[in-house]
Amino acid sequence: MHFDAFDRYHEKSSFLHGLDPRVKVLVTVIYIVSNTLLPDAAWYSFVSAWIFLIAANLLSQLGIEYTFKRSIIALPFALVAITVLFSIPGKPISTFQFLMWDLTITDAGLLRFVSILIRSWLSVQMAILLVAVTRFPDLIHALEHLRVPAILTTIIAFLYRYLFVLTDEVLRLIRARESRSAAVAGQRSGGGVAWRAKIAGNMAGQLFLRSYERSERIYNAMLSRGYSGHLYTLNPHEMKQRDYFVTAFAIAAISIVQLIGRL
Amino acid sequence: MHFSPVPLHIPDGFLSIMVSIICWVITIITLGIAISKTNKALGEKQVPLMGVMAAFIFAAQMINFPVAGGTSGHLLGGALAAIVLGPWAGMLVMTAVVAVQGLLFQDGGLLVMGANILNMGLVTAAIGYGLYRSAAGRSKVVKLSVAGVAAWLSVMAGALFTALQLWLSGTSQLGIVIPAMLGIHALIGLGEAFITVAALSFILQVRPDLLGEGSESAKGGRGWILAGGLIALAVVLISPLASGDPDGLERVAINMGFIDAGLDASYQVIPDYTLPFLGETALSTIVAGVIGIFVVGAVVVLIGRGMRAKA
């Protein structure tokens, strides 16, 4: 497996790709906070926040449908919000029976449900865009600049570095299980659920030991190359004038989105 | 390449700003302690180990086994990580896992990451390790069965915390979200328990030194037993209470101002933004936050005492 098998980064040379990663992280977080703060049914704000997102999409050379397609991933979670349809008092819109309950959808409930979905949908897309235009190591480096403790960013960097290595390991384990799980057509092979769980557990234990021993080798290799507890990067990450300008502009735009929602 | 989605990863937009912030505060305080503890206890040697272990948890979540009807069981790993690496290191490892799931795969949001780390990393590690620690020095069978119960309860605790946060944010109704979340996770937790027990018994067989007397896993203080026990008690007490009599819990929360804290913050404090953070609701929010911090602080102090008593 190639080292960037999990990367969501898209190699392009757009305006957004060239920005300092700190700016991108900061603006993304501010944008998400702003979405969370918007009141229910602030339609004009939702639309202007969406325009902000589209503008960012256009600046990224990825096209506006890229984040849209990937945003479907967060959709199943909408299930947990379904109860607000019925639980917020308001004018009844429609009543129906589900199993043993009489459920009444209220107008206030519907507004809140739709608002939650829109907020989430906009925020998820911005986060998708962030990792599509920022290399993950740059992202980690930006977090370090933004005062995330070094021990955490280093663990995350290692996780990222060895994720594909251990995924290969898992795939080998799974392939080994498959190759030993022959079955006569129409008959199930192996034992019951508990037996299968035990096999999966053994695989997890095996993976743990392989990872553990690998980490010892890695540490020895790093020591022999002069590791003293710090990771260095060649990327200097300097804020340019353009970065400050973009930050100011984005904050102003997001403030306007907030204002629209309050007027 | 697919990762099985875990219904505990809350995306952005589902939690109110105040609930998100309170969760971040609790998470940051706990992580701060975890970092200072691990920095003291472990050398720089442990950083690569924890990094690779985080990748291990990530990869281990891909190992699944068919259960029935197209569903499959798989690992979350919080309890396992805390048991084999020790509680503080386990928390850091799980934090890295949740962070990468949110950052790289959008499996869980950014603003709500504090909540996700709390639910899937800190709570699961505390309860998983706490209960396992209570079986220290017992026979292998007792240890493994306790680990199984701990793993199951860790998933339930994560689900309970998630449900409570969704409810405080006004996203879900308590009487529905708790039975639904806990019902689903009672099953998911079984998979977690089976895999955790099997993995531990495998490790005990092949490398018993990793879980023996001198290992990180044996060094946690007795305070963990208390912390784990308290969370377990909360799961056991609150869940039936909330499912059977949601109004009861709701009334308690209203009396204590928690509902205002979570729910109103998102659309009442900020709309009156002439005086943000001075309104009545904001005060109650802050009070609720402070109560939360005190609770965490109390637990932490107890843990610290337990550790000192042992040392």
Image: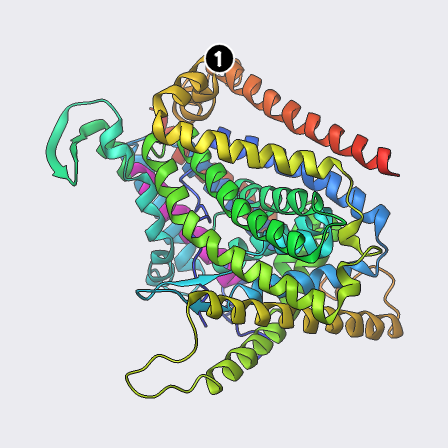
Q: Is residue A129 magenta?
A: yes
What is the magenta range? A115-136
Counting every numbered tag in the picture gives: 1
Q: Position of residue A204 (x, y in %)?
A: 59, 68
Left-right relation of A213 to A227: left
Q: Nearer the viewer, residue B213 or B290?
A: B213
Residue at the spot x=79%, y=74% of the render? A217
Residue at the spot x=71%, y=39% of the render? B224
Q: Is residue A127 magenta?
A: yes
Q: Nearer the viewer, residue B63 or B170?
A: B63
**Circle 1 is placed at which residue position?**
B279
Q: Position of residue A73 (x, y in %)?
A: 37, 57
Above or below, comparing residue A173 to residue B199 in the picture: below
Q: Position of residue A68 (x, y in %)?
A: 34, 58
Left-right relation of B267 to B204: left
Residue at the spot x=48%, y=47% of the render? B109
Q: Identify residue type, mark 1.
A: Gly
Q: Is residue B112 visible?
A: no
On the rendered image, what quadrant is the N terminus of chain A found in? bottom right
Residue B302 quadrant: top right
Q: Is residue B13 visible?
A: yes
Q: Position of residue A71 (x, y in %)?
A: 37, 56
Q: Main secondary structure of the magenta part?
A: helix
Above or below, comparing residue B1 to residue B302 in the picture: below
Residue at the spot x=51%, y=69% of the render? B63
Q: Nearer the viewer, residue A127 or A245?
A: A127
